[in-house]
Image: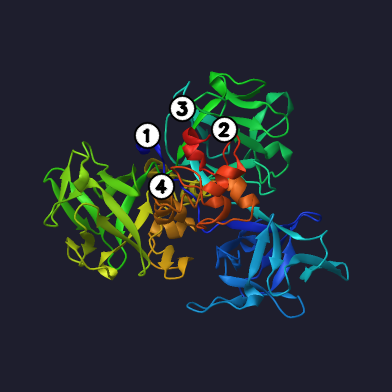
Amino acid sequence: MLLREIQFPCVENPPSCFLTFSDVWTHLSCNPSDGSTFMSKNRLGWEKWEIIVQDHNTGHSLIKHKASSRLLSADSYGNIYTQEAKDGTVADSSALWIIQENIVRSVAHSNLNLGAINTRGDLTPKVSPDNKNHAIVEYITGELCFFSSPDHDRCMSCGPMGKMSMSPNWKGWEVFRIIGVGDGSRHVRITSWTHDTKVLCHADQGRVFTSNNEFGMQSKWVIERPYGDSKGVAVKSAHFGSYLSYNGESFVMEDSIDKCTLWDISSAHQQKYYLSSVCHDKRIGYDNSKDNIYCSGKRNEWEAWQINSEGDGLVSFKSCVDGGKYLICTNGGKLKASHELNREALWQLEYSPNGGIFIISRNHDWHLSCNGQGLETSLNKGIGQTWILEPIMPSTISMDQITMYSSIGAATVALSVAMPFAIMGIIGGMGFTAGGISAGAGMMSAEAIASGGGVAAGGTVAVLQSIGASGLGAAGFAGAMGAGGVIGASGGRLATAVMGKSEEQKNEGTSSSSNTNMAYCNWRHWE
């Protein structure tokens, strides 16, 4: 296996979802002004919730309303309400939930289901033993990827009107989201990252199209690797058993696998990151004209680095500028750049109690450090030596933004710039404490705030868990979400190392054509 082929997945975190009562096809909603809960037919901001794991061993989680940051809770009578989230305090059992097989269960009520009762003709959310009309978790976040055709050298693209095409670009319209259906199967849905209501669908007679918020059988797919074929994966209809194909002119469904039905899946951030100081708004950069390593408040190409796995839990940092060199540390702690990938170019990443990671020279034990004025190395382990890996997402623009800019006469400028409204870094978006990984708030780029989300697992979490012995914690959405797992976990079906499986998982066995325990961008290493 070539270590450099392993990709750190780009996964949205914390996972967002709708809490859907499928029997009546309504969703649990919350009014941000007063925190009251109610049932709604809408699928908008008030209906979106985030799942934040509190204890990976028990599976206890918080369910936070995305628009108000209030926590879903159940009182002693089983009535549903929301309460304010209090930083630095442990939530009591009223706000703790367990998600099993996509069903939400209350910890305070001996794992009874979150359900709905009929009150004078209106449905009211309530913890209930009723197993019929219960809420299911309908995930709307997942692994962000490019789907490219090796035969056509083009990427699958979803344009501003939601129309599917093939494009030579590798930008935001070409990024798709793979979401596990969560029913215990290998079924996934594929949605546009930029136009997030657009779902890839198929119909009889081979028609391929996108539809708004379609969640029927025509939107379910299985991604599998054909036996003995290393050129790509097949995207198969879960309903018809046919395969997604591009014939050079349009998307069609084919009954058998050939070169036109093979797709290469790669991570959306293309392994590029900013290395950002936690306590200072600074990033590590490389000036190739001066052959100089420096610290800067900017986020440009000179501050971008490609992170590669080098085995044994080690990584290398390669500058993304033309003729990029590796970041190395000499015996005396001096930082330099080199074309040679040697021992001085190997780095070890460790969790920091200050909300990030330490970046340590494997050969000399020096820690990267930022004093606010410049970059240095130190043997200390403090806030000045704590860093965040911020994934660099491609630029994109949505139809709503095009409409907005058109209304103010700025459409040409907006389209030419293709503003990166979703550079979803994890600057302060994902923290690390003595108790484990926790979601937090803090510094975040203006683009990330404008986009309203964060690709946390594409950054620090995914890298740490991909290279370490604990395994790839952000992998396998189809299997992991179906098992009730949440991104960032280190146990169960989520904890499959990029370099191999645990003994327990080896005993379980895996599919030879599809491996839900590894990220989709690492399909080459499925067994």
Q: CA distance from mark 1 to mark 4?
A: 25 Å
Residue topped by disc 2: 164
**Is 477 placed above or below 236 here?**
below
Q: How packed is label 4: few (under 14 Cα within 10 Å), some, or many (20 or more)?
A: many
Residue topped by disc 3: 154
x and y percentages locating residue 194 in the rendered image: 51, 45
Callout 4: SS? loop
- Residue 139 vs residue 326: left or right? right
- Is label 3 or label 2 in front? 3
**Is 303 placed above or below 163 here?**
below
Q: Amino acid at mark 1?
A: Leu
What colour scheme does the image use?
Answer: rainbow
Mark before the other along the chain sequence, 3 or 4 = 3
- Residue 434 vs residue 163: left or right? left
Residue topped by disc 1: 2
Callout 2: SS? strand
* Residue 370, image quadrant: bottom left
State yes or no: discs 2 and 1 in contact (Cβ < 8 Å): no
Q: CA distance from mark 3 to mark 2?
A: 13 Å
**Is 343 placed above or below 365 here?**
above
Mark before the other along the chain sequence, 3 or 2 = 3
Q: Amino acid at mark 2?
A: Met
Q: How packed is label 3: few (under 14 Cα within 10 Å), some, or many (20 or more)?
A: some
Q: CA distance from mark 2 to mark 4?
A: 21 Å
- Is label 3 or label 1 in front? 1
* Residue 506, image quadrant: top right
Q: CA distance from mark 2 to mark 1?
A: 34 Å
State yes or no: discs 3 and 4 in contact (Cβ < 8 Å): no
> Which residue sits furthest right?
120
Mark before the other along the chain sequence, 3 or 1 = 1
